[in-house]
Image (cartoon, rainbow, N blue to C red):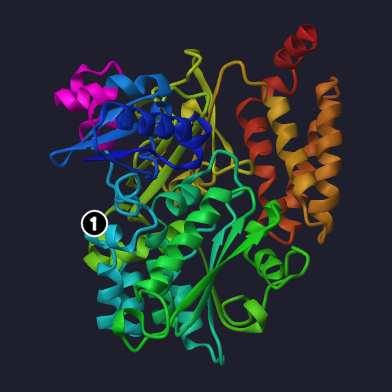
Amino acid sequence: MKIYVPIDAAARALGSDEVADALRVELQKQGVEAQIVRNGTRGMIWLEPLVEVDLDGTRHGFGPFEPEDAPALVQAIMARDMAAHPRAIGVVEDHDWMKGQQRLTFARVGVIDPVSVADYEAHGGLAGLRAAIAAGPEKIIEEVMESGLRGRGGAGFPTAIKWKTVAGAEGAQKYIICNADEGDSGSFADRMLMEGDPLCLIEGMAIAGIAVGATQGYVYIRSEYPDAICAMNDAIADARRQGVLGQSMLGSQYAYDMEVRVGAGAYVCGEETSLLNSLEGKRGVVRAKPPIPALVGFLGRPTVVNNVLSLGAVPWIMEHGGAAYGALGIGRSKGTIPIQIAGNVKYGGLYEAAFGMKLGDIVNGIGGGTLSGRPVKAVQVGGPLGAYVPVSNFDVPFGYEELGAKDALLGHAGITVFDDTADCVKLARFAMEFCAVESCGKCTPCRIGSTRAVETIDRIAQGDSEAIETLKDLCNTMKWGSLCALGGFAPFPVMSLLTHFEDEFTGPGAARREAAE
């Protein structure tokens, strides 16, 4: 019998290590033989630690689990009566949160032992890599092109175009770089995949290597993700032992190997050229483009830089075909998107579904509304530099162009929920303060503009309504004059708040705030 206890960072923060220890003690005490498997999380964070018992091939869930619940669980196992435990939630796959999803990239997350090639392959892993080896470079790029896969890190650039550019570039050595510097607040999908199914990312990077002729890759992970770093290193080591990586992948003529590199925690290193500088041992500052990394990237060589979720989608595409992936979604937003729901929300976690769901259905239906029970005021989509979308726009479909039409960004697909007590002026100040702290300092609009914007918002908070025009002018300068998306996107949250909640910056809203202070 197998008992699954998550080793995901969120579950560990909620006590899953203590739960695993308590279960080991209780199993030994009651003389029950069972294997404890440390898996990833299913994404239902409000139920973590979520313990699962595999009984006759069916996974029964119990959560949120406490160490003191261990004796009763062992007794329920002995009686083969899972429903008798007070923490029982039933069959995990039958839970409403799970039934509504279309799990492609996250199909194995929470299901398998994350660092076991044998378990990965037993659950369908490596089928995409085998298909890629049989297809060859040109056919791989054709399938990815047909899938419509776009960058999942924020920019939404077509993945196949980037691969085709690198494949056609001249270079003695080419590289695949995975951008795992997930710095957006309210975003955790990259971490979840690396901790729960790192071999999916390894497989995707290997396929990319075949497609463009790269034999070496690097996963650039932020230092704040120690569990992901450990899982990736362990999975890479097992992949080498099993012949998945190396001079002859799965016995083929293709060679590919990869390593983990750890960043120092700078938010700006999520931008691809800044990441490349850091990877080369230089200061993490943005490079001017052109030349683009696809032609002059890591160490001056042709380089693919893709996000974790982009590369993680590739194995499914190669196994099932680009057309099958492209049939999902809406407009130019093809396939599925792992939506990360956080903030003041009842059911926070990760939910993978096809593009096109209405934002209101995600927040109120899947997320269950606010945890506080108060009305939703707005949600910030796409991280700390994403726009705030008010309830009046909750009918917008979740897609790149659809959100763009509302002056919003899909970004990394993180959604942070705020109720009606949120202070819009403070939220606007946080966005600019964040940019000022995290700016690499290379370009003036970002370095100076964000600092001046913080000062200007402070003037507005003190009742200087004339400073609003100054703030708008600063936002316009940063949007169009910054060298990279850090300074260019910082105005989005500020301008969205000014647009949808203007009365909080001037007029009755400002008067109420001043009276409260």
Of residues 124 and 369, the one drawn nearer to the viewer in this rendering: 124
**475 horizontally vs 363: left or right:** right
Quarter-wise, where is residue 99 in the image?
top left
Q: Secondary structure at mark 1?
A: loop
Q: Position of residue 94 (x, y in %)?
A: 20, 32
Q: Position of residue 358 (x, y in %)?
A: 37, 36
Of residues 478 and 44, the one drawn nearer to the viewer in this rendering: 44
Q: Which residues are magenta?
A: 73-98
Residue type, label 1? His
Q: Is residue 154 above or below residue 274?
A: above
Does residue 361 show up? no
Q: Is the residue marked by circle 1 packed among few (<14), some (14-19), or many (20+) residues within 10 Å?
A: some
Of residues 501 and 70, the one drawn nearer to the viewer in this rendering: 70
Of residues 125 and 396, the one drawn nearer to the viewer in this rendering: 125
**354 horizontally vs 372: left or right:** left
Q: Disc 1 marks which residue?
A: 123
Quarter-wise, where is residue 503 in the image?
top right
